Structure formats: structure tokens, C-alpha cells
């Protein structure tokens, strides 16, 4: 009985941690970029432990709208630390969105920040030309 309570307490603690750290706005050293007016809209699904599609493409100055669908069985999120944006940490079957302007070029890391998920392969790329 005690082990079941411990497991539920651990799951709850991981959930609370993920919710509090998912969509932090990080200080940005990004330069000011004039928006192009182009909008890239994409839906990304995530599960244990993957994103599909794994790579998203946009041009510098594009507005990027990502809808993240958690098709897994546990909590997940989609965070782009370099841009300081991300979805909330959401339970299985839920959806959340994020919108931002791609302010720098390069191969930008996308990850799930729930502890252990990126390390198990829940990473992707935003390729900005």
C-alpha cells in the first residue's frame, strides 16, 4: 500500500515540476527582426518519447504557430529554449499552442522539458533559414 502512495506522490511531483517549468520566458538576446508577414502553422504530435514531425522549417522573420498534441500516455510539452517559448505541460490527449517570430537563423533545438524526456529522445529541430 505504501509503495502505491509513493508512486502517486512521485507522479504528482513530476507533473507539478513540469507545469512550473514548461513555458518559462527566458531572457532573449535575439536581435530585432522585422516580421515578414508570412505565417508558418504546423501541428506537432508528441508521445513517449518523440515528436512528429521531428523537424519544422521557417524563414527568419516568419510568425510560427505550433499546435502541440500530446498523443502519449503521460504529460509532455514542447519548448524552444533559444526563443524562450513553449507550451504548457499537458496531460495525454490534450492540445496547447505557442506562437512566436523566428528571430534568428540556424538549427534551433525543440525539446520536452519534463524531466528525463529529452534525454530519452524527445527532441526535434526548428530549422530557420
Image (cartoon, rainbow, N blue to C red):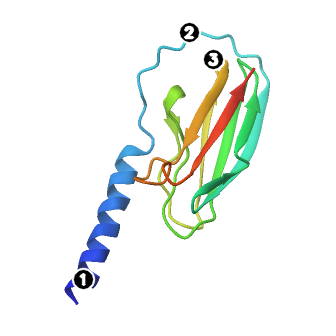
State the CA–CA distance, disc 2 to disc 3.
8 Å
The secondary structure type at the circle numbered 2 is loop
Residue 112: x %, y % from top left: 51, 48
Tell me: residue 99, above or below residue 54.
above
Q: If the image is split into quadrants, where does the C terminus sit? A: top right
Do residues under tags 2 and 1 come within 8 Å of each other at their CB atoms?
no
Q: Where 27 sits versus 98, above or below?
A: above
Q: Are marks 3 and 1 in contact (CB under 8 Å)?
A: no
- Residue matched to label 2: 31
**View extreme (front): residue:** 120
Q: Which numbered tag is attached to residue 104?
A: 3
Q: Mark 3 falls on what kind of element? A: loop
Q: Earlier in the sequence, mark 2 or mark 3?
A: 2
Q: Which type of secondary structure does the marked residue at label 1 adopt?
A: helix
Q: How would you rate the neighbour count of disc 3 (Cα within 10 Å): few for under 14, some for 14-19, many for 20 or more?
A: some
Marks 2/1: CA–CA distance = 51 Å
| Total marks placed | 3
The location of residue 5, given as percent across then percent down, is 24, 81
| Numbered disc in front, either 2 or 1 | 1
**Farthest right residue?**
38
Residue at figure coordinates x 50%, y 64% from the top left: 91
Residue 68 in the image, given as x and y percentages of width and height: 63, 51
In this view, the residue in front, 94 or 8, is: 8
- Where on the picture, by quarter, is residue 93? bottom right
Label 2–label 3 contact, CB within 8 A: yes
Residue 119 percent location from the top left of the image: 48, 49
User: Looking at the rendering, which quadrant does residue 26 occupy?
Assistant: top left
Front residue of 21/51: it is: 51
Residue beneath the point at 76% across and 39% down: 41
Amino acid at each position: 500500500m505504501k509503495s502505491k502512495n509513493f508512486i502517486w506522490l512521485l507522479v504528482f511531483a513530476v507533473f507539478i515540476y513540469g507545469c512550473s517549468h514548461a513555458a518559462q520566458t527566458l531572457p532573449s538576446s535575439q536581435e530585432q527582426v522585422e516580421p515578414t508577414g508570412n505565417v508558418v502553422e504546423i501541428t506537432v504530435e508528441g508521445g513517449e518519447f518523440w515528436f512528429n514531425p521531428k523537424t519544422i522549417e521557417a524563414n527568419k522573420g516568419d510568425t510560427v504557430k505550433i499546435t502541440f498534441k500530446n498523443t502519449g500516455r503521460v504529460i509532455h510539452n514542447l519548448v524552444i529554449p533559444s526563443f524562450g517559448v513553449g507550451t504548457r505541460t499537458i496531460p495525454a490527449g490534450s492540445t496547447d499552442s505557442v506562437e512566436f517570430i523566428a528571430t534568428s537563423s540556424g538549427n534551433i533545438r525543440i525539446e520536452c522539458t519534463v524531466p528525463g524526456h529529452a534525454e530519452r529522445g524527445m527532441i526535434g529541430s526548428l530549422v530557420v533559414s
